[in-house]
Amino acid sequence: MNIRFNAVLAILLVQFLFTSCDNDTETMPVPIEEVVPLQVGNKWVYQVTAYDTSGSPLSTSSFIRSVLKDTIIQKSTWYILNNGSIVQNSAEGYVYYNTAGKQPVLIYQGPDYGGIGYMYKYPQYDLWVLTTRTNKLNTVATAAGTFDSYLFKIDNQRTYHTNISVFSMKQDDYVAPGMGLIRSDTYYTDSDKIMKRQELVSYTFR
């Protein structure tokens, strides 16, 4: 995951849609969707393009995201990425391990969730992060190929304590099952104008 927050998690999870279950049937293991293929040695290369407010490219750069090793936390297998994130695919979705709170935090929720919300408290402001998943597959072309992906709409709302001013920033993440993040579009504050695009260029799976 390319957005990380070093803050105390104030609200763990807001689940807007609950699944129903039949109490007359036996409890079956929940199938785990491989949102991101986590195996030691897997690697993704991304190109990042920054844009000005008129939509013209300003600069390009690239980075690599890779799975360095696995580890056991609370009798469960987790994977450590080269940016320090500790992640896994779970029954709820793709999660990272919050070391401060010692608990998993959803990044990309499974299809049974209408949305998830977190609030992070900073000295100067409170940050609300709301993620909704679109369960209709979108065909998205990238430099690495064309993939059927789910759209995760991420809304970041920052409320400052001093003057109660509120600023919002949107991000659209396209995630292909079994492939992971293939494109991420970040928009200017309080705008629909794209500020940055992160696009999958190549990948290597073990």
Image (tube, rainbow, N blue to C red):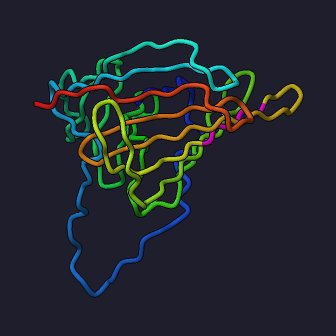
Question: Which residue is at the front of the view, 147 or 100?
Answer: 147
Along the horizontal axis of the image, is 57 left or right of 75? right
Image quadrant assignment for residue 1: top left
In the picture provided, is 175 more to the left or to the right than 68? right
Q: Residue at x 52, y 41 (%)?
A: 172
* Residue in the picture at 39% in, 41% down: 104
By secondary structure, the bulk of the magenta-drawn segment is best described as strand
Q: Where is residue 14 drawn, in percent x and y?
A: 56, 54
Q: Is 171 on the left-hand or right-hand side of 145?
A: right
At horizontal 28% and vertical 45% (from top left) the residue drawn is 89
- Residue 23 occupies quadrant: bottom left
Residue 101 higher or lower than 64, as above or below: below
Question: Would you say residue 106 sits in the magenta stretch?
Answer: no
Q: Nearer the viewer, residue 145 or 119?
A: 145
Q: Which residue lies furthest to the bottom in this view?
A: 24
* Residue drawn at x 22%, y 28% as measured from the top left: 203
Residue 201 occupies which quadrant of the picture?
Answer: top left
Which span is picked out in magenta?
Answer: 155-159
Nearer to us in this view, 9 or 188: 188
Question: Looking at this rendering, what residue extends furthest in the left direction?
Answer: 206
Q: Which of 181 and 33 is in front in this view?
A: 181
| Image position, residue 51 (x, y; %) | 60, 21
